[in-house]
Image (cartoon, rainbow, N blue to C red):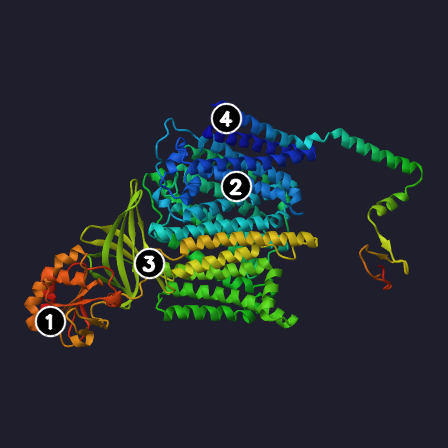
Amino acid sequence: MGIGSILVGVALALLVGAYLARPFRQPEAEFDRAIEHWVAQARAALQAGEVAAAPAATAAEEPVNFCPQCGRRVGTDDRFCAGCGRPLR
Amino acid sequence: MLSEVGTITIGLALAVCLYASLAVFLSIRRSDPRWLQSGWNGIYATTAILGFGLLLLLFAFLTNRFEIQYVAQHSSRALPVYLKVSALWAGQEGSLLLWSFLQILFALLLIARPSVRTRPLLPWATVILGCVAAFFIGVTLFLSNPFARLDHAPFDGQGLNPLLRHPGMIFHPPSLYLGYVGLAVPFALAMAALITGRVDEWTRAARRWTLAAWLFLGLGLFLGARWAYDVLGWGGYWGWDPVENAGLMPWFTATALLHGAVVQEERKGFRTWNLVLVILSFVLVLFGTFTTRSGLIQSVHAFGRSALGYYFLAFIGLVLVGSFALVFRYRSFLRGNSSSEGLLSREGAFLIALVLFVTLTVSVFVGSTLPTITDVLSHRRFEAGPEWFDRVTGPQFGLMVLVLALCPLLGRSAQALRRLRSRGWPALVGGVVVAGSAALAGFTGWTSLVGFALAGMAGGTAVAEIAWDVVGRSRRKEEPFLQALQRQVSRHRRRYGGYLVHFGLVLLVIGIIGTRVHALETEVVLSPGEEAQIGRYTLVFEDLRQEQATDHVRTEARIAAYRDREYLTTLTPRIDAYAQQTVGVPALRPGWREDLYVVLAAYSPTEITLKVFINPLATFLWLGGLILLAGGAVAVWPSAEEVRLPVAEARRRKVRNTVAAVVVLALLIAAGAAMWGPGHGASARLVGRPLPGQPAPDFTLTLLDGGTISLADLEGRVAVLNFWATWCPSCEEELPAIQSIWEEYQGRGVVFLGVALQEDEAIVRGAADQYGLTYLLALDIGEQVSTAYGVTGVPETFVIDPEGNVAFVHIGPVTAEELIEELESLLGQ
């Protein structure tokens, strides 16, 4: 077998090997640290009696609007309130 | 270098593919998404590597690298490029490589864009597909490496098997392979569903995969049928290659699966049936590859007896045992509601259809393997011929068409009879109309009329069901008919695709009955100029031409064909003699009522043997097949309801789908044009030569010695019209004979007229002086007269009787004896 073929084969194998190993290159420890961090936050919140704040925190992530006139919950893109008809934008 | 890199590539692909299966398996065991991702990367990598391998092989073919054994065996320098490309899959090694590539490509497509339904099944399905692909890659690498080297590279390759030199070679094998490979996907999804206990979800997840595989398999079979019709000389039903049966069987079981899946999705019925069908489909695919590679069945498709067969047999055994063990182990999942609606309901009709598909498959299986089994058991081959197949499968097909006519009419059992009474009339009308028109067209005979009636009933039902729905919608929503049709179809693609498939099947059945029951086959021996009457057709053998092509000698017979004694076309059946083999290429004149099909069976300098077939309704075969496949395409197209996406994504998909559709359509049109397009050994001239007994075409000619002559001047006299040219050696040979006969007969009122196909008067005069011609001579200015007489070459001689009808025709030189005999017979009257 020619040296050239061997080189091509090794190069190909290395390339593929790197590709296969890619999902493992994000170290597991990073995930663990992140999870530990969230758990610590949650625990702190619980101790501070802020459990009720948790839903509000998630709500803040998903912007939700309310109609200034009737207080009905409306979509962020709505132009009119579905409850009272007040123009929203 | 090339061969080494190629081998390394396949080896690497095998390793990566095995790793991918293992990694995904580990991800299931350890619930670790990183292993899953790595495994999927492995699938992507394997696809890329094998694709690279295929490109390498293609490169080897295009650059004539004959040091690679596979290239040397299947290509040659003279081979056209499109055939070099198709030579990739002309032999066992290359086709296995292609198979491996497609197999892993389908796994990639499955994981690349999973639907919500498929997602939970994906890990196990990937493991299974990976193992299947690894088997094929392993077989390719260890047992039939396409990159194997020859010690001494020959200067030129052996060339492609002449039988394979046909546009069909481009389209038929890849679409069959796509179908075969595709059937592994529903199998993998079904097994994954069993293992994960989601037995009701896999049919929906696998629906479009099954449909796509069914479609490709059907397309492959359809193109194969046409190819056989075009080249192999139309062996006839079941007289075709047994390997076509190997493709037909999984197609039957896949069809059954498509029907069973409907019931499972609607009513959670037929769970076990569907599992058995999906396993059978996959196993039959493997069986098909096994038969072509084991030498078990004698066929043009066989790649020769090889040890490969045993590995395939072992793999089939493994799949069968493994999958049925899974079914047995998880049988508790399969106990569903076994509400039986009775046979007179839609579900009952589906059950009958499934049973029929299975018995048909078994019949074909038995018929294909019977010769081998009887050979092993009693050392006497029992060849299951067309008669055997007709007797065994004919009634089953008949029953199937009957079910097709009734099934859509049946709802739940309670209403079945009432619905039959109120909506059954289109079936009756269809049956009467089709059988009636067939009888009027002359296709009588008890069996075929029953068949036509059944087909008509099924057709009537299919058309009426669509019409009712669309008319109903157009009334309800006040939409125009076409809009209602379009909306209705796009909402319920599977349903209307199904009706279209059924309608195509009806046309197919009509074509099958016509070509099977009413075909006419006969053999005639003709010498040049002689005519034969076959049914309504008159065939006149004009001449035989030989031509040396780069790697073969082409012998072509030209035959003028007349229908009801009216010129139709000129057929040129031929025999191509290659070094290895001779291939007969038939000539075909298609028609709605019947195809005229002529094969040059043998030739000698003095006569030819023709096999003439008249195949009624063959066009319906192709039309029916086309509509059937179009129906499948309608069903496989994603329906608007199914995909709910953001607008931008939907638009992107729409663009992509349209591009894909255009590409597929272009490929299909190319295939259609190559296989059904013009040519096929039939080329019609404007005017044919008049047959003896027909009126001679009128003409007016200016004579060389001044004055004109026309047909009317010859009335009451016998005339000899000789078309000739000064440059034609055989004309020179016959001129003295014609002159001497003219001298002998001029006293008895016979007119001789020489029509020269040459416009230079001086040359013609010189020739006339040289041969001492004293009869009338004229120039055929603009070849008007020779065109009117359908003259294709010189010399040709027409003898015209006193009534102005053609009495005798000579294509090529005429001898003095012949001419004297003919003149005597006319003058003696």
Mark 4 or mark 3: which is in front? 4
Gap in angstroms between the C-alphas marked 4 and 3: 53 Å
Q: Label 2 to label 3, Cα distance in Å?
A: 38 Å
Closer to the N terminus: mark 1 or mark 2? 2
Judge depth for marks 4 and 1 and give the one in front: 1
Q: Secondary structure at mark 1?
A: loop
- What amino acid is labelled 4 in the image? Ser
Query: Is residue B398 shown left or right of residue B577?
Result: right
Q: CA distance from mark 4 to mark 2?
A: 26 Å
Q: Are marks 2 and 3 on the same chain?
A: yes
Front residue of B418/B361: it is B361
Three-letter code, disc 2: Leu
Q: Is residue B258 above or below residue B119?
A: below
Pointer 3 chain: B
| The residue positioned farthest toward the right in the image shown | A48
Tell me if I can see residue B399 in this picture.
no
Tell me, yes or no, whether the two marked residues, 4 and 1, touch with CB atoms within 8 Å: no
Bin the neighbour count of mark 4 within 10 Å (Cα to Cα): few under 14, some 14-19, many 20 and up. some
Percent from the top left, x then y, of residue B608? 22, 53
